Image (cartoon, rainbow, N blue to C red):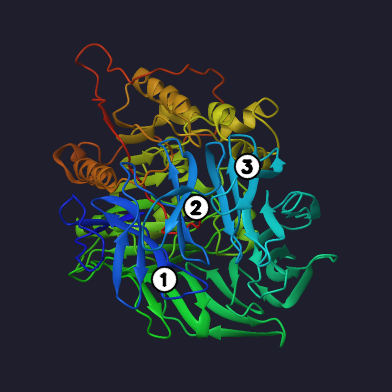
Amino acid sequence: MTAAAGAGPSSPAPQTSAPGYRVFRAALPEVCAADPARMVFTADADGRCEVFTWHTATGTARQVTGRPGGTFHCSIDADAHVWWFEEDAHGNGRWRFQAFDGGPTYDGLRGTPVGQARGLAVSAGGIVALALGDAVSTTVHQGSRGGVARPVAHLPYQASLTGISSDGELLAVAGQARSARAVTVFRTCDGSRVARLGGEGGALWSLGFTPRPGAQDLLLVREDGGRYLLATWRPGGDPVPHTWASFDTEITARWRHEGRGVLVRQDRHGRSVLHLADLDARTLTVLPTAPGTLLDAAEHPGGDLHTLWTSTAEPPRTLSSAGTPLPSLPRLPVPVPGVSHDLWTPGPDGDLHTLVTLPEGARGPVPTVFLVHGGPADHDRDAYDGIVHSLVASGFGVARVNYRGSTGYGPAWRTAMSEGVGLTQVADLVAARDGLVARGWADPDSLALWGTSWGGYLTLLALGTHPGLWQAGVAVKPVAHLALAHATTTPALRALDERLFGGTPDELPELYARSSPHTYLPHLDAPLLIVAARHDAKCPPGQVRSYITDLTKHHKEYEVVWLDTGHDGYDGADHVHALREAVVFLDRTLRGANAAGRRRRTTTPTASPAIRRGESGPAEHAAAPAGGSTPHHPTERTTHHAEGHHQQRPARG
């Protein structure tokens, strides 16, 4: 979800309550397979993300949901029933549905417990499978639409339901892509396991069953030999790799409407390439697209290709190759400000790519904000971002660095960690910073970092390990203390930590401390804005409170905003509020009267990766130190939801 500055009234949804902004989730509408004129999508509804129907024959939208916290996950089945996930602030809830034209609302399956959404699949005959999870496990339930739920599989790990065969007989469930349980196929009738496909020799991803009636082919993507290739599986056999459909950077794919061809969307160097793979003819064809990013692409009956395209200069827009009227996304009344550049910086594992946007008419170096993406397995794209828009319109330059560990540059780049976890990525941020300064684009005395989640972690780590290189930081829902976060985060993220480090914090305490922001907090010398969430399961609040306590103890200059939400949120008013808070903070710290006194620092530019063995316990609030002589002014505010910098990526229910 993002906030588009100055968005116009083209969306069928009402105007957001924040003047000059509209909040939206950039995703293609879901299309009813049996009646392509009927669709469902999410859009702004008075500042919240909600579910709407869309009928192409009339060009009208109907709002389906209207919940205080907003609604994000939605779908439509072959009988044109509209589905959505009704969740609380902690992300727990149930799947619900109603007829396309309205009427009573029903539970997707009766008797399911409340849980986290892990996938929904509905066959052409109305057989429903839905997966619900908790912190440690996943249960797949099955039944007829609106009928009584029957558990068919319980998995002692976090997993995602990725599809149901067209005849309703088979279910595909995805686990960790590099494990022995990467993909598991079950029978719906009795929950028996048909196949388990492992990803130990190379990551394996499940992308759904063919829509072709009577067929049970499952589409897969396999990482193999430093490349990514398509594969298919059918009952009774092993996965069949299609070596002729091989790619040097990350891909995702989906079946064409007829169920033999495949649309392949490739992320390559911050932009997209769309391919058509013919599995019968064994041919791969590049389909023409404008330079930028395809956030999604899907084919529907009659060969109608729907695409969702964007670039840094243009907000996402939907397009139908057959001219089908699609619900419009917000439009901007004026051109998006800024001039975009690509910066490539030589590095130890290859050239480092940075997407740079500078204010129009800039003369000489400008105050610059590094927007640090999360993940680490994600990347910044040549795609519209409301934060980039707001910063550039405010006179800041923006740098988006696809550091080592990012996707879109191949497996070797994704796994490069030569300087250590986190420290490798910080080294790339430093290299990109030096490159921008050398080009004369960025003012070396007016630089900031802004990141969310893993990006917030890197922000804190960079500020502590390289004091003096940046003059301000914004860390949204960050990991601030690796060992404390590992103890209280989700099992999936604990497993990620252990994979990155090669063990647990108890087994490798010095390695975790070397990469943890709290180790370098005493060296931090830049004003800091922290946005944290009280119910954040991924980047838990306790480890953030510990970091804040140490900020106070060491007399650091900081501000804190506490959110009464989890890691995600769908209420746009607070998204815009957080955006404004951050921009005002950066304006004050980089360009205000107080900023002049911080320039030309004399502190050592790099803090050695030493080990700090002592740890402070969690505290409920950050308390200002007694006395009036301390140089910092911590403040603490509470709101409900906010989103930091993250990519517009369609998420299916």
Disc 3 marks which residue? 496
Q: In the image, what residue occupies the spot 85% across and 66% down? A: 237
Q: Earlier in the sequence, mark 3 or mark 1?
A: 1
In percent of width and height, residue 332 lies at 22, 67
- Who's the residue at 66% across and 38% down the image? 498
Question: Quadrant location of residue 592?
Answer: top left
Q: Measure the C-alpha gap from mark 3 to mark 1.
A: 40 Å
Relative horizontal placement of residue 448, taking residue 196 as reference (left or right): left
Give how far across and how far down residue 258 sits, in percent: 61, 80
Mark 1 touching mark 2, by CB under 8 A?
no
Look at the picture and state if 408 lies above or below 275: above
Kind of residue indicated by mark 3:
Leu
Do tag 3 and tag 1 residues touch (Cβ < 8 Å)? no
> Viewer-nearest of labels 2 and 3?
3
The Cα–Cα distance between marks 1 and 2, rounded to whole angstroms, is 47 Å
Q: Which mark is residue 529?
A: none
Q: Residue reaching furthest right?
A: 236
Relative horizontal placement of residue 516, taking residue 648 as reference (left or right) = right
Label 3: few (<14), some (14–19) or many (≥20) C-alpha neighbours in 10 Å = some
Q: Amino acid at mark 1?
A: Arg
Q: Is residue 442 visible?
A: no
- Label 1 environment density (alpha carbons within 10 Å; few <14, some 14–19, many ≥20): many
Residue type for callout 2:
Asp
Split into 4 quadrants, where in the image is the N terminus?
A: bottom left
Residue underneath mark 2 = 428
Q: Position of residue 588 (x, y in %)?
A: 19, 41
Find disc 1 in the rendering and name its residue: 38
Circle 2 SS class: helix
Q: To which quarter of the image does residue 385 belong?
A: bottom left
